Amino acid sequence: PPADSFADVCAGTGGLTIALHDRFPDAYFHCEEISERTIPVLLFNLVVRNMHAEVIHGDSLEQTRKEVYKITPGDRYSEIEEVDDVPPRTFGEVVSNPPYSIKWSPEAHKMDERFNGYELAPKSKADYAFVLHGMSLTADRATFILPHGVLFRGQREGKIRTKLCEEHQIRTVLGLPDNMFLNTGIPVCIMQIAPETNELLIIDADDVCTKEGKLNVMRPEHIEKVLDAVRARKNIDKLSQIVEWSEVERNEYNLNIPRYVDKFDPEPLPDIVDVVKELKSLNKEIEESEREFYSMLDQLIGTTEETQKQLDAVR
């Protein structure tokens, strides 16, 4: 949906921000990025598109800032101004493709307001720390590209996921094919957070793609098929399922996609005539094998009187 402002956490070179700007050119954009090598490319991408934005060069989780840039539209290109800081605010929507399952320092954030009411994400996997940070930047929707583990891993992550489900804040879970990205071969999912969602939509699009070399590629027709399912928010055979929160509770808040979207194709029943023919053929083979066996047995001669008696008994 349209919004007047967007925040992109872990913005990289600005791919998600640029895609949003193509749709909403008058919106204001907030970008956060930690990589010193990436920041110049991100700034360039924003400036040449004459965007209105702010860029935080720093660590989103630790809330440390190296530089802050204000991007102001001009006649043709934006102007860059380095500023001391920008005032805190919330944004219409958040998007984020954070680094998957990186380490962080949860013990330093026990009093952090962003995580109030939730368990702290484990130090070995910061995925939910990024989710909660993104949620703190908006009162509306936040959409994340994440590893599938966030859907079913237990302990601290399980407790965070349970609370999100109990508060009906997960709106959509969309599973994508593996080998879609150049930087990872693992399958990923898109998780959309929204306040007070009546039911959860789960989509399994792991086979909605075409193979191109080692990569699985979603062509426009594949993307449109998935988007139709997102817009319709209804049950579509082997693709999407509307899930009641009571069912999620029965599954102990495990959101593993195959639990909800059934892609099983029963094998077709064989033709009864063919089955009978095959049985008759097998019986014939068995009979021929038995005759061959007894013929070979008749040619055997025992080396001792006792073994000869045993062979005679078998015959």
Image (spheres, rainbow, N blue to C red):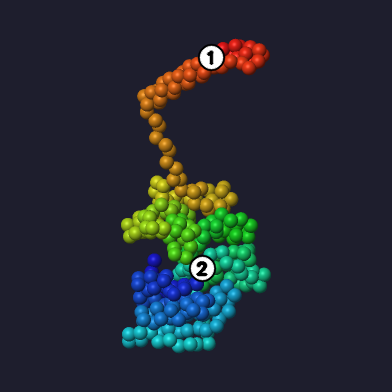
Q: Which disc, if any, is residue 14?
A: none
Instruction: Examine the image and state in which quarter residue 58 appears.
Output: bottom right
> In the rendered image, which residue does mark 2 sit on?
98
- Nearer-the-camera pick, 193 or 68: 68
Residue 6 percent coordinates (x, y) = 44, 73
Near mark 1 (Cα within 10 A), the count class, few <14, some 14-19 or many ≥20, is few
What element does badge 1 sit on?
A: helix
> Residue at 41% of width from left, 22% of height from top?
281
> Residue at 47% of width from left, 73% of height from top?
12
Residue 5 percent coordinates (x, y) = 43, 74
Q: Is residue 133 above or below residue 217?
A: below
Q: Is residue 23 visible?
A: yes
Instruction: Examine the image and state in which quarter residue 216 appears.
Output: bottom left
Q: Is residue 198 above or below residue 127?
A: above
Left/right of residue 223 with respect to residue 32 in the rendered view:
left
Left/right of residue 286 with respect to residue 118 in the rendered view:
left
Residue 149 percent coordinates (x, y) = 55, 57
Q: Are marks 1 and 2 in contact (CB under 8 Å)?
A: no
- Nearer-the-camera pick, 81 or 243: 81
Alpha carbon distance from label 1 to label 2: 77 Å
Q: Where the N terminus falls, by quadrant?
A: bottom left
Amino acid type for the residue under numbered disc 1: Asp
- Count of numbered marks: 2
Name, please, the residue furthest toward the front.
Answer: 303
Q: Is residue 75 above or below residue 108?
A: below
> In the rendered image, which residue does mark 1 sit on?
298
Amino acid type for the residue under numbered disc 2: Pro
Earlier in the chain: of badge 1 and badge 2, it is 2
